[in-house]
Amino acid sequence: MKITVRVWRQANPSAEGKMVAYDLDHVSEHMSFLEMLDVLNERLTLEGEEPIAFDSDCREGICGMCGLVINGLAHGPERTTTCQLHMRSFKDGDVIDIEPWRSSSFPVVKDLVVDRGAFDRIIAAGGYISAPTGSAPEANNLPVPKADADHAFEAATCIGCGACVAACPNGSAMLFTAAKITHLGLLPQGQPERTSRVIGMVEQHDAEGFGNCTNIGECTAACPKGIPLDTISRLNRDLLGALAKGKA
């Protein structure tokens, strides 16, 4: 099929960016979206032009590196990562707009590449445990209620892609932060830092310039791992409890 892609081009963080259109023929519906960009970059290289910079790593929907805003939607029209989106989701003659994540907390590095270091700093503010765990323990040594184990695993599937931020009208990263807090807060090993963790990570979230959560739900609709909105409710309960302890 033949398509036109309009791609955000920006040489560096301080440069002025703009959308640039490219026509592509003979695009196979079996290509992944990133393979389509690879083909375009091969052509640009042969023509002596600067290839389009974009992030990718595993290309298996695991690492979260490949996030793009495609036709105004985080990761595109399917609920999946960009690398797992295929060209069969588009039609012959389509015009496809491709932009980086739009958030002041994710500054553009070049073209479609953004700096998501803010997520790393939120994790560093408390997304860990200090209890020495040694080697992997016998699974039944520490009884964990089935419901807690299921919710912890569900939250742990977050890959930190940033789709929640890109989809949120407020630019909030609360779903990401809540997933990391919930994952550890439901497990026995995560209890010693439970109070300091939620306060530290939420404070860092706000310090990074992310917006507030107003429960619109776009974050969970765009999340490729389907992390539910009630994860944020768990964060809020932990935060209120931690603040209450601090005042006691």
Image (tube, rainbow, N blue to C red):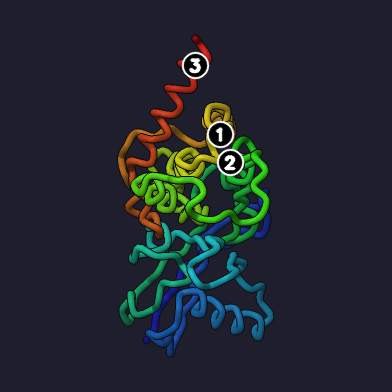
Among the 4 quarters of the image, the one containing residue 130: top right
What whole-number distance in Å separates the C-alpha atoms at marks 2 and 3?
Answer: 20 Å
Q: What x and y, as percent, mark residue 79? A: 35, 63
Residue 64 can be seen, yes or no:
yes
Say which amino acid is labelled 2: Gly
Q: Earlier in the sequence, mark 2 or mark 3?
A: 2
Judging depth in this view, the residue of 229 and 241 nearest the camera is 241
Q: What x and y, as percent, mark residue 199? A: 54, 27
Judged by depth in the image, the label closer to the viewer, 2 or 3, is: 3
Q: Earlier in the sequence, mark 3 or mark 1?
A: 1
Residue picked out by circle 3: 245
Q: Residues within 10 Å of mark 3 (few under 14, many from 20)?
A: few
Q: What x and y, as percent, mark residue 48? A: 69, 80
Judged by depth in the image, the label closer to the viewer, 3 or 1, is: 3
Q: Along the horizontal axis of the image, is 3 left or right of 37?
A: left
Residue picked out by circle 2: 127
Judged by depth in the image, the label closer to the viewer, 1 or 2, is: 2
User: Residue at left 61%, top 83%?
Assistant: 42
Q: Is residue 40 above or below residue 154?
A: below
Residue picked out by circle 1: 201
